[in-house]
């Protein structure tokens, strides 16, 4: 087998691809040869009717011009691939169903799903955790991934080939102080990953999870500098990772080079889970 990543002829759907990790994932899959659809609650040319529902990061992205859904699709097309930008709320099952249908009509059946859409702005110790935001985080981070996986599953089963990659976090494996809802959803994604891996194996579908540590996305830049520095000092490399580090791992897991890998939570974390001193 040639030791290269070739996704030519594959169609990928990346959720939450307007910026950060999702944007890097989409561009990397396109460079590897895939046609890519990006589904996000924010698309430059469309209004944000409920942006307040998704918290300060989404609001800041819009006000500071950091929504790149359509711009990323333009870059994908410039690479010679087909691209599609779709406004979609992953918590709304009908929107997810319609999105998968549109991708199938315009690009072809979905072969690759990257469940990247998520929220991470709910911070507070247990007594300060908001029940409303707890439910929102469950809906976006965990149920949203379930909704998308369930929608693409028939396409993958019919073709006898599929790759699902869920975006977990070290918060889901280590816990997160003041991050009860976020940590819980990311831990849940690891359980979902293993279950889908078991069910998908007999249909040629693999399901794996990426477990990022400290990655230098816009969300990191918006974070508390003191807290960021504490997390960086805990990593073995003593530096934040780059979105491309995560995207490279995803491209590998989606390729034929990883055809015998399923049910794995792959740490792309700089060794933050190691004992560091």
Image (cartoon, rainbow, N blue to C red):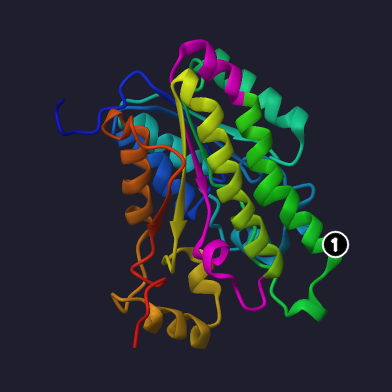
Task: Tell me the quadrant of the picture where the C terminus can be found.
Answer: bottom left
Task: Tell me the quadrant of the picture where the N terminus can be found.
Answer: top left
User: Does residue 19 lie above or below 170 as drawn?
Assistant: above
Residue hosting label 1: 132
Question: Residue at the spot x=30%, y=22% of the render?
Answer: 8
Query: Residue 164: within the magenta?
Result: yes
Question: Residue at the spot x=79%, y=62% of the render?
Answer: 133
The image quarter in which residue 103 lies: top right
The image quarter in which residue 216 lies: bottom left
> How many dots with numbers?
1
Q: Nearer the viewer, residue 120 or 81?
A: 120
**Secondary structure of residue under mark 1:** helix
Q: Position of residue 59 (x, y in %)?
A: 68, 61
Q: Position of residue 240 (x, y in %)?
A: 37, 71
User: Does residue 83 lie above or below 235 as drawn?
Assistant: above
* Few, some or many residues within 10 Å of mark 1 (<14, 14–19, 20+): few
Question: Residue at the spot x=46%, y=63% of the render?
Answer: 217
Q: Which residue is outermost to the left?
A: 2
Residue 14 placement, left or right of 6 = right
Q: Position of residue 104 (x, y in %)?
A: 55, 16
Q: What range is drawn magenta here? A: 152-179
Q: Nearer the viewer, residue 21 or 49?
A: 21
Q: Nearer the viewer, residue 142 or 71?
A: 142
Q: Which residue is outermost to the right?
A: 131
Query: Residue 171: within the magenta?
Result: yes
Question: Residue at the spot x=72%, y=57% of the render?
Answer: 137
């Amino acid at each position: 087998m040639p030791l290269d990543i070739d996704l030519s002829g594959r169609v990928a759907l990346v959720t939450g691809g307007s910026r950060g990790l999702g944007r890097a994932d989409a561009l990397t899959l396109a460079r590897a040869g895939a046609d890519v659809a990006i589904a996000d609650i924010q698309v430059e040319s469309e209004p944000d009717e409920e942006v307040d529902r998704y918290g300060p990061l989404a609001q800041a992205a819009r006000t500071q011009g950091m929504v790149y859904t359509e711009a990323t699709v333009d870059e994908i097309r410039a690479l010679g691939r087909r691209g599609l930008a779709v406004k979609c709320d992953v918590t709304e099952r009908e929107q997810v169903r319609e999105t998968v249908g549109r991708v199938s009509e315009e690009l072809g059946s979905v072969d690759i799903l990257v469940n990247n859409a998520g929220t991470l702005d709910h911070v507070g110790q247990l007594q300060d955790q908001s029940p409303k935001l707890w439910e929102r985080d469950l809906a976006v981070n965990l149920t949203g991934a379930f909704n998308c996986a369930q929608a693409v599953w028939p396409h993958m089963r019919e073709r006898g080939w599929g790759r699902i990659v869920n975006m977990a976090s070290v918060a889901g494996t280590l816990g997160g102080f003041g991050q009860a809802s976020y940590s819980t959803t990311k831990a849940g994604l690891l359980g979902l990953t293993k279950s889908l891996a078991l069910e998908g194996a007999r249909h040629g579908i693999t399901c794996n999870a990426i477990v990022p540590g400290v990655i230098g996305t816009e969300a990191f830049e918006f974070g508390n500098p003191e807290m960021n520095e504490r997390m960086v000092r805990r990593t073995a490399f003593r530096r934040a990772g780059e979105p491309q580090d995560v995207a490279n791992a995803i491209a590998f897991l989606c390729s034929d080079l990883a055809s015998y890998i399923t049910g794995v939570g792959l740490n792309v974390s700089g060794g933050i889970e190691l004992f560091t001193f």
